[in-house]
Image (tube, grey):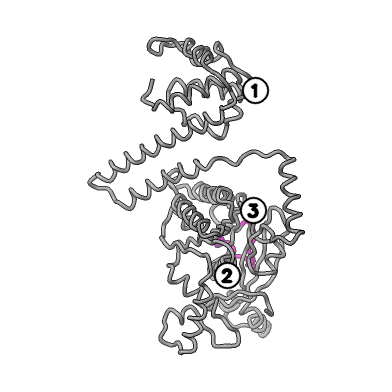
Amino acid sequence: MSALTQDALQAEQALLGAALVDPATIDRIRGIVVSDDIGEPIHKLLFDAMTARRDEGGGFDVALLRMAIGDHDLGGMTVAQYIARLAANATTTANSREYALEIRRQADKRRIKAVASELAVAAEAPASRPAEVAADAIGALDTIASAGRGSTPAVSLQAATASVLAELDRVRGGGKRRGTPSGLPSLDRLTGGFYPGQLVILAGRPGMGKTTLALAIALNAARENGVFCCSLEMSADELAARALAALAFDGRRTALTYRRIAEAASLSNDEVERLHHAKGRMANLHLQIEQQPGMTLGQVSARARQWKSRCERGGTQLRLIVVDHIGLVRPSTRYAGNRVNEVSEISGGLKALAKELGCTVMALSQLSREVERRDDKRPVLSDLRDSGSIEQDADVVIAAYREGYYLERLPNLTPEQEQRLFDAQDQIEIEVLKQRQGPTGRFQLFASLPCNAVAELGA
């Protein structure tokens, strides 16, 4: 026998004994325990044989298991004798879930100890880089933390239907809809807001206003909900300057661009007062900025969980995570060199994070340069860069397009083009290219990119 703790050994024996009494036990604990959670080698062989038989649609008993794994000596007793003893000592199948949870807990404790041991060895290595050693440890521990939150439980159709109708009655009775509003009525009419578990991709070529739009949505959502902004491209100060410009925006007064805010010297006393007033409006915003560049998916997930916990302690809920942008999330080494698989792993991981934390993850994404080769530069789904899995994993894909950006760069504009530029210079076109449970559509918004301001046209 291996050097397992007594609790771990007994939990494994109890679960396997329960399965010998009722093979359907294996079906009931799927999703809680996997083969790698079993610490005792003979138990792992038995568990694998049992799951293989259930996958084939069959059952198992002492004789079938002995034939599957052989009848070698375990040191004082044969495999057949040990299986028979497990069956004889089994008392009940009622606690199989509790046995499975204990096995998982014990396995996670072993994994934590292993990470700690590897961390100590790596830290002492002469050529080790502390930042890389810590990042690897964080990634390994985050895998344990996320898996330890358990799988999403199966729900009957009747229970799911009852939940839908209960939500319908709650909203009809005056309750707020579950969706987190973007604060932009045209977008909210089309999407109904952003929902827990959704992966939303906000895509566009450089200069189209993706960050401007994402920050506007984040500021609107943060008035009532927790928001986590993971800025892999800009510093917190840069985002703060953009947020100040957005909140201080007044179309009737001198433009307070975020560049002027950063440079500071040209600001008047009145404009400084406007900025302090904008800062006061931020007092009740539940928004956290993570500015570390080159973060892994594990690091993004771990820090989002930390902010979720802080939000809950403060009496609010994390509803939106913004990742700017998906191409800057550092991939694991699993698919090193294969960019398509790396991006697939990241997009799938962000979708899993949205479901785990019960919030929306909005990830910004660059579009392929193929857009620039077309006469009509409006984005289409196939323009998503690096991987078709982004389109597949996303619940909603939103594209940003600014005709004014391209018109400004044309030489010798015709009178018609000059008029179009005049009409479009403060507009951003938003198109919902995909919505898993709703319509697609296109609409225009007012957008002053230098001031990071986005609003309904005519508002």
Q: Which mark is residue 395?
A: 3
Do tag 3 and tag 2 residues touch (Cβ < 8 Å)? no
Task: Give x and y (percent) for residue 112.
Answer: 39, 39
| Residue occupying the point 44% across, 43% down | 334
Within the magenta stretch, is there residue 380?
yes
* Magenta stretch bounds: 366-382
- Residue placed at 37% from the left, 47% from the top? 136
Q: Earlier in the sequence, mark 1 or mark 2?
A: 1
Q: Which mark is residue 216?
A: 2
Q: Nearer the viewer, residue 327 or 115?
A: 115
* Residue 108, quarter of the rendered image: top left
Within 10 angstroms of label 2, few (less than 14), some, or many (20 or more) residues? many
- Numbered disc in front, either 3 or 2: 2
Q: Are marks 1 and 3 in contact (CB under 8 Å)?
A: no
- What amino acid is at disc 2? Ala
Q: Nearer the viewer, residue 165 or 442?
A: 165
Mark 1 — residue? 57
Label 1 Cα neighbours within 10 Å, binned few <14 / some 14-19 / many ≥20: few
